[in-house]
Structures are given as structure tokens and as C-alpha cells.
Amino acid sequence: MDCALTKTRFKDSGSQWLGKIPESWGLKKLKFLVSCVGGGTPSTGTPEFWGGDIPWVSPKDMKCASIKSTEDYLTELGVVSSATSLINVGAVLVVVRSGILRHSIPVARNAVQVALNQDMKALIPKGALTSSFLYWIIEGNQSQLLPLWSKPGCTVESIELGYLLNTEIPLPSADEQETIVRFLDYKTGQIDALIAKKEALLARLAEKRIALLSHAVTKGLDPSALMKDSGVAWLGEIPAHWVMTRLRFLALGIEQGWSPQCNNQQAAIEQWGVLKVGCVNGEAFDENENKALPDDLEPRTQYQVRDGDILVSRANTKELLGSAALVRDVRAKLLLCDKLYRITPNESVNPDYLVRFLRSSIARFQYERNATGASGSMQNIGQDTLKDLPIPLPPKSEQDRIAEYLHGVFNNTSAIESRVQGVINKLKEYRSSLITNAVTGKIDVRQFALPTTGQEAAHA
């Protein structure tokens, strides 16, 4: 039996984030319902190991809804400084400190024994509260709870334990908690499976788009064209009437910009701003990705970006390294930053065609092969790597046709992707609303029972 809108009588919880809850439910501060245990990161050389098979959990592991196996989520050997960091099955794990404030509280239910690092806390329920019900309370109300739990004015995502533990939470009976958890596990599992299918479709669309792009800028649009060896092993054959060149011969200049210490806010239209590297991450140049230049700094006007500039990310994560965009209809007073290259194309190349090639998997292979930087989270492309990039170049008129064709491809796939992403967003909104309504008693799930195999098949 599915859930229905509850006809239960309600009472005011006295809490803004909770609103009304069923009259039969209790209300209690979290500090009376859980024990809170912190973690730690040992100093180098600490000899204590938990046999090498206990996950040492850090904020980066909290992408998952639950930590289900050591094989999936082990990031480092479980070296801990004290036995208090060893958390048994059944705790709710919360990130209490993790970078820039993002209005989220990464949270997980652990299903295995884990050790925590210093940015993590374990909430271990006792008495009337079950860990799974607590998990769903936090999971479904993150946007409401984080402002209550964070220190006012902080720019670092940091939860104050005093605020957290003094939060009042709803407390239905143990049986009702169990039913709500069973309902949410089942329903969110269905929603998550739908979201996964839609995200897989987005991935396939992206792969198809990249394949079409890379084929068009290396093989052309005429499948009957005679081919010749490009002379570049990883590029293979190109149309016989194309020429091989390098980026340095297609540019009037290549330069990088200036990165002063800026205000952490977007520049107003009358202010000078410095572009952020994210301005080239999408399909089109995004001028809103900028930071305001402080009033006491004189702008270096030689770095002002202009229509027709091609911008390329020179320092970024591996996935975004080499992202490129053509500047169009840009507002005044925006400056090139040090993490971007500006390419000024010459008359022998269509700027749209050149951007498409720079965004292709062929160009990306070259970037990744020659990138520097020890950190996987930050790679760099040297200017010589960019200048020496081998480029198969068709005649100008053919460049124009390829650029127009790819523009149509991207418009079509973007429209499909936008619709699919819209469905994903609605599913996520529905998921969040469902959780919130269930854990606050707004929907009555007391009669919910898991469907049998036959019932599931009938609804498939």
C-alpha cells in the first residue's frame, strides 16, 4: 500500500525548519539522542593500523549515500591516532568542515566499520532514535539545516557542534521510524534509478557529440574524400587536400593574463572585473564568471578581452584543462586572468572552426600528454605545448561549412540535453520534497508495505 496525505492532527513544533508535525510525535534536542564522536588524522609514521581493511573516511568519500564496502570507498589505509576514531556500523557520518560554504551537509549511513579524519563527526544514536531515521532527517533538509548549524559570517563550510546538537528533531515511535525509513529507502531507490538512467543518457549524448566533433575536424564531412597520412601517429589519416600546420602559424599572438587579488563577488557593469577560468567551461563564453577588481588597483587595460578572442584554460583540473571558448558580445572592462591563454586568430582560420578543434578529443589528447603539475586537481598547459599543437587544416570555405555543421549538431544535442536535465532537476526536487514530507509527518506512510515481486513487475 502506498502513502497518502495524512489526516493526522498536527501541532506546531515551534521550529521554523520543521513547521507542524503530527500530534503523536515527540520533539527532542539532538544532544539527548546521540553521542558525537570525532575523528583525527595521524602524524606521519604513526604505527597503528586497523589491519589495512578499515576505510579511513574523509569528506571526499561522502558523495555516496552510504558507505557500503571497503573496496568501493577505501581511499587510504586506515591509519588512526586513537581507538576513539574507530566507528562501528550504524552511525550517521557528517562532514563538519569542508571548504567553501555550499549550503550542503554531506552525510552518509555507514554499513561497515570506519575510521574518520579530522573533518568528520559520527552521530551515534541511542535510545529512541534510529540511525537510519536520523540520516533521512539530515539528508532531506540540508538547505534548512546548514544555516542553523553554521557559524554566521563564515566563508568556510564549518558546522558548529553546539548548534547541531541543540537542534530539535521530530521523534515518531520506533515502529513508525522503521516504516518511514523503509518507505524512503524504496522510493528514493526508484527515483535514483530514474536519475541514473537520465544521467547515463546525458553521458551518451556527450560522447556522441565529442565523436562527431573530433571526426569532423580531422576527417571532414565528405566520406568519399581521398585520404593521406597526416604524419602524426595519433592523428592518423586526413583528407588529401588538407594541410598539417601548428597553432603558432594560425595566431597573431598567444598570451596569458593577470591575476591580482580580487573581491569574491561579480563585478558590477560599471566596474572592472577579472575573468575566472570557469568562463570557458561551457559550450559558450560566460562573461558572468568574473571577480570584481578592487577599487585601489589600476586595471591593466592591455588584458581587456575583446570580441573575437579565443580563450583557453591553461591551468585547471584534468577534465577541464584546455577548455576553449570564442568571445562574443562581451561587456566592457573584463580582464584576462593568468589561468587563461588568449589566442588572436589570423585570417587563414575560421575562429569557430579553431575553437571546435581546440575542444576536440584530438586536441585534449595532446594537452593531457604534455600537461605538467603533480596534483591531479590542477594541471597546466605550457605556452609552447599550445603553440606546437598539430592542426589538420582544410581550405577556408570548408572550415566554414564544418563550423556551421557543428553549430547545428551542438544546437540539437543541447536542446535534448536541456530537456533531459530538466527532468533530472524535477526528479531531484521531488526526491527532496518526498523525504522532507515523510520525516516531518506531512505524508502518512504508516500503512506502507514493500511491494511483492509480482506487484513490481506489474508496475514496471
Image (cartoon, rainbow, N blue to C red):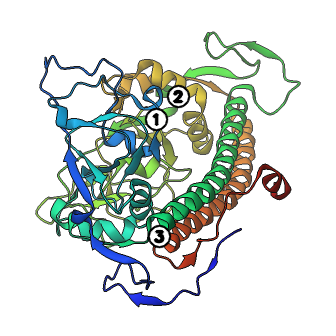
Q: Which element carries disc 2, helix, strand or loop?
A: helix
Task: Determine the residue positioned at 61% across, 41% down.
Answer: 350
Q: Secondary structure at mark 3?
A: helix
| Residue 322 - label | 1
Give the class, few, some or many, for how many residues have Cα within 10 Å of label 1's Cα (few <14, many ≥20). Answer: many
Q: Position of residue 202 (x, y in %)?
A: 66, 47
- Spot occupied by residue 289 in the image (x, y as percentages of width and height): 38, 57
Q: Quadrant of the C terminus?
A: bottom right
Q: Which residue is most to the right?
A: 224
Amino acid type, mark 3: Val
Q: What's the distance in space between the residues labelled 2 and 1, CA to CA?
A: 7 Å
How far apart are the two marked residues, 2 and 3, measured between alpha carbons?
A: 47 Å
Asked if labels 1 and 2 touch by Cβ distance under 8 angstroms, the answer is yes
Q: Determine whether, in the image, residue 402 is placed left or right of residue 335.
A: right
**Residue 160 showing in the rendered view:** no
Q: Is residue 80 left or right of residue 233?
A: left
**Residue 258, placed above or below residue 225:** below
Residue indicated by mark 2: 364
Q: Which of the two discs, 1 and 3, sits closer to the camera? A: 3
Mark earlier in primary sequence (2, 1): 1
Q: CA distance from mark 1 to mark 3?
A: 45 Å
Q: Is residue 378 left or right of residue 307?
A: left
**Location of residue 80 (image quadrant):** top left
**Eyeballing the image, is 91 above or below 169?**
above
Name the amino acid type tagged 1. Gly
Residue at 30% across, 65% down: 146
Q: Nearer the viewer, residue 230 or 75?
A: 75
